[in-house]
Amino acid sequence: MAYYVYILASRRDGAIYVGITNDPVRRVYEHRIKAVPGFAARYNISRLVWFEAYDDPISAISREKELETWRRAWKTQLVEKDNPNWDDLYESNCN
């Protein structure tokens, strides 16, 4: 089973959310319909702009915790390295 660390954004230069899941299609969909109240729902954060896959949950959780401590500029650089236009990757990778 794969585990995914992901970054969602409300828009380019908008609010950012870092999360982990073993089912990115389901989890991003939950964000989109605001199924779980919280930060992402409050700030309309639902665009999948970056993700990485891991083979084990410990590595994925470690990476998520690392990214959560990063400065915003570092997260922005990480996203823009592979997704310079901040395209919604959900449309091209999860459908």
Image: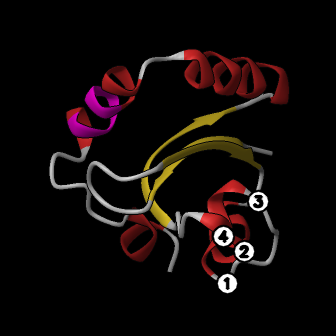
Residue 26 in percent (x, y) is at 73, 72
Q: Nearer the viewer, mark 3 or mark 1?
A: 3
Residue placed at 79% from the left, 78% from the top?
35
Is 91 on the left or on the right of 85, as rendered? right
Residue 44 in percent (x, y) is at 53, 70
Residue 34 in percent (x, y) is at 71, 77
Circles 3 and 4, Cβ within 8 Å, touching? The answer is no
Q: Nearer the viewer, mark 3 or mark 4?
A: 3
Question: Considering only vertical position in the picture, is 6 above or below 62?
Answer: below
Residue picked out by circle 2: 30
Circles 2 and 1, Cβ within 8 Å, touching? The answer is yes
User: Which quadrant, please, contains the N terminus?
Assistant: top right
Residue 9 quadrant:
bottom left
Q: CA distance from mark 2 to mark 1?
A: 5 Å
Q: CA distance from mark 2 to mark 3?
A: 12 Å
Is 17 on the left or on the right of 58, as rendered? left
Question: Considering only vertical position in the picture, is 57 above or below 50?
Answer: above
Residue placed at 36% from the left, 53% from the top?
14
Checking the image for residue 31, the label placed there is: 4
Q: CA distance from mark 3 to mark 1?
A: 12 Å
In the rendered image, the residue lying farthest to the left is: 85
User: Bounds of the magenta span?
Assistant: 76-80
In the image, 78 versus 91, the foreground residue is 78
Nearer the N terminus, badge 3 or badge 4? 4
Amino acid type of disc 3?
Answer: Gly
Q: CA distance from mark 1 to mark 4?
A: 6 Å
Residue picked out by circle 3: 38
Q: Residues within 10 Å of mark 2 (few under 14, many from 20)?
A: some
Q: Residues within 10 Å of mark 3 (few under 14, many from 20)?
A: few
Residue picked out by circle 1: 33
Residue 50 in percent (x, y) is at 42, 46
Circles 2 and 4, Cβ within 8 Å, touching? The answer is yes
